[in-house]
Image: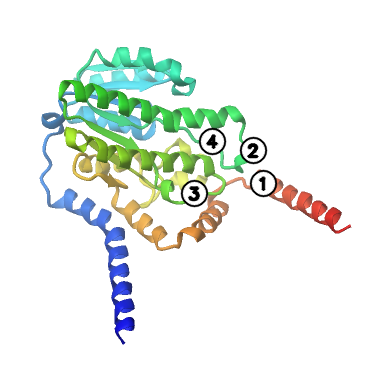
Amino acid sequence: MIILTFFAFVGIWTCLAKLYYCLKTPMLLWYHKYLRKAEPLTERFGKWAAITGSTDGIGKEYALQLARRGFNVVLIARNEEKLQNVAKEIENNFGVEVMTIQVDFSHGPEIYPKLFEELSKKPIGLLVNNVGIYTDKPNLMWSYPNKLIWDMIYVNMAAATEMSLHFVRVWQADGTRGCIVNISSCLESHPTPYGGIYSATKAYMRNFTTTLQHEVRHLGITVQLLSPFFVSTKLLDFSTWLRRGNIFIPSCDVYVRHAIRTLSKVDATTGYFWHSIHDMLFRLVPYQHRPKVMAFFGKCFIDDFTEINAQLNNEKVVNAKNDNSQTR
């Protein structure tokens, strides 16, 4: 009887812990949206913010909404024409200062000395690490060209690492209590067939950011992990249905309006209430079964699955030939 009671207690405790873990983020998002009064971010982090990947999608929207809140912004991206267009839009609409830095993070270590020299010209107190790349369309991992794989490593992983550690060093030296927002993806927790390298880079982002939070907390530096599910950006061009958007797939404007309210209030969040519900449902699936679930949804939503099917069928043919040769 004592053993049964013990296991019942452990089971109840485990269920409650799982329920708390799943509901924590949605409840915090609801609380910060409706019950907690927001303080001006410029009073806490100063007047300058830097955003990587700031000419499209979530990065551009962060630049616009931070400027609306009174921040001067440093726009960092690889396309000079787009940089100038976004800079003019911000200057005309919000009357703040804008600095642009043209840089291609896929070029690796060589870009950082000059980039850091340019960034040192402004007293930046808020950094948004948004830059990231996906593939033109989902595919099997071994079908990606090597250059694309290294581009994803340099852009999705190394960029946030280099930028975060640079500003930690700067802020530690001058006593600034700055803030870093690392934009990851909910795929960080869900192994994703046909997008495996991308989801792996986001798993790195989660572990790196979570560790950094603990290491810099005593310095008064805030580090936030932002892990959205799908947002209607050009990264979803492989799927007409996903690109169309719905309540679970918001526009960049809607998503960032929600996410920015959590800045400096929550260490890790999806940034959007319905994404948290989405994430909660996925976490109910045992980890070892998530790849199968993600593969199923991939087949449902990817417009053109013919190339993946062709490669999978080719693998089956090769395996069958190998089996026959071994039998003989």
Q: Which residue is mark 1?
A: 306
Name the mark nearer the viewer: 4 or 2.
Answer: 2
Q: Earlier in the sequence, mark 2 or mark 1?
A: 2
On the image, which quarter does residue 203 sit in? top left
Classify residue 41 as left or right of residue 199.
left
Residue type, numbered disc 2 = Ser
Determine whether the residue tagged by mark 1 lies in a helix, strand or loop: helix
Q: Which residue is mark 4?
A: 135
Kindly identify the amino acid type of the residue bearing the numbered disc 3: Trp
Does residue 208 show up?
yes
How far apart in space, not on screen, are marks 4 and 1 (Cα)? 16 Å
Q: Position of residue 252 (x, y in %)?
A: 34, 39
> Where does label 3 land, which residue?
241
Mark pair 4, 2: CA separation: 11 Å
Determine the image quadrant of residue 130: top left
Image vertical order of residue 70 relative to residue 260, above or below: above
